[in-house]
Amino acid sequence: MNGTPDIPKVSDEGNRALLAAQFALFAYICALVGDTQDAQDVLQETNLKLCRELGTYDPSRPFLPWAKRVAYYEVLSYRTRKSRDRLTLADDSFFEQVAEDAGNAFGDTDKDMAYLDICMRKLAAFARELVEARYIKGVAVSDLADACKCSPNAVSLILFKARRTLAQCIEKARLGEAPS
């Protein structure tokens, strides 16, 4: 970002908020666009716009709703560009209903991600390292098995148990219980 003259330098707090919102923004945009490749393009445009507009963001308000509003307008721009193609898109009332439904469906993503962070810290170190390697870094199960000197089935079982433990922990947090 330092080499791009039209994008101001974003604060560390702004960077953290933008990074934390990426999954929810992508899911929201995917729901509106319907094509993951196009959604990735719209997300990039949204991120550029968010970086440019970060100075207008009020940090006393939640970041994600503001970012979704910016994404919504980027999706509208995408629809305008696409409408010039020979494809026929759904009418605006349908699109607005999908946008509202998608916004509601992904409203709790920030909370769930915070719960996931808490619950990840409670996993055994070995399981946590496998989960991070597999689901954050994208390392194949067979490569994890080679590194751990165990079978791919054993790695898959550990990952399955870790996912189940995380799901239970997040569900308890949603119900207001202390994550365990």
Image (cartoon, rainbow, N blue to C red):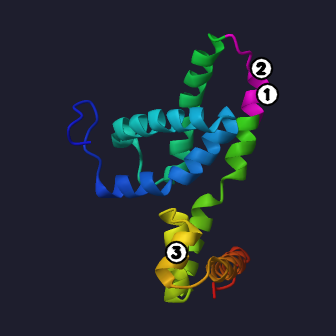
- Nearest the viewer among 164 and 145 is 145
- The span from disc 2 to disc 1 (Cα, nearest Å) is 6 Å
On screen, 89 above or below 164?
Answer: above
Numbered range of the magenta stretch: 86-97
Mark 3 surroundings within 10 Å by alpha-carbon count, few (fewer than 14), some (14 through 19), many (20 or more) = some
The structure residue drawn at horizontal position 72% and vertical position 51%, both measured from the top left corner, is: 105
Residue nearest the observer in this picture, 76 or 40: 40
Give the residue at mark 1: 94
Nearer the observer: mark 3 or 1; the answer is 3
Return the residue at label 2: 91
Assess whether residue 96 is covered by the magenta stretch. Answer: yes
Work out whether 17 lies above or below 42.
below
Residue type at mark 1? Phe
- Callout 2, which amino acid? Asp
Instruction: Please state the horizontal and vertical placement of residue 18, each as a whole percent of the image.
Output: 43, 51
Whether residue 59 appears in this view of the structure is: yes
Where's residue 90, x and y in %?
77, 22
The reply to whether discs 2 and 3 touch (Cβ–Cβ < 8 Å) is no
The residue wearing badge 3 is 144
Is residue 114 visible to the viewer in this orientation of the structure? Answer: no
Nearest to the eye among marks 2 and 3: give it: 3
Q: Are marks 2 and 1 in contact (CB under 8 Å)?
A: yes
Give me the residue at 52% from left, 80% from top.
128
Q: Position of residue 126 (x, y in %)?
A: 51, 86
Q: Marks 3 and 1, how far apart in space?
A: 45 Å
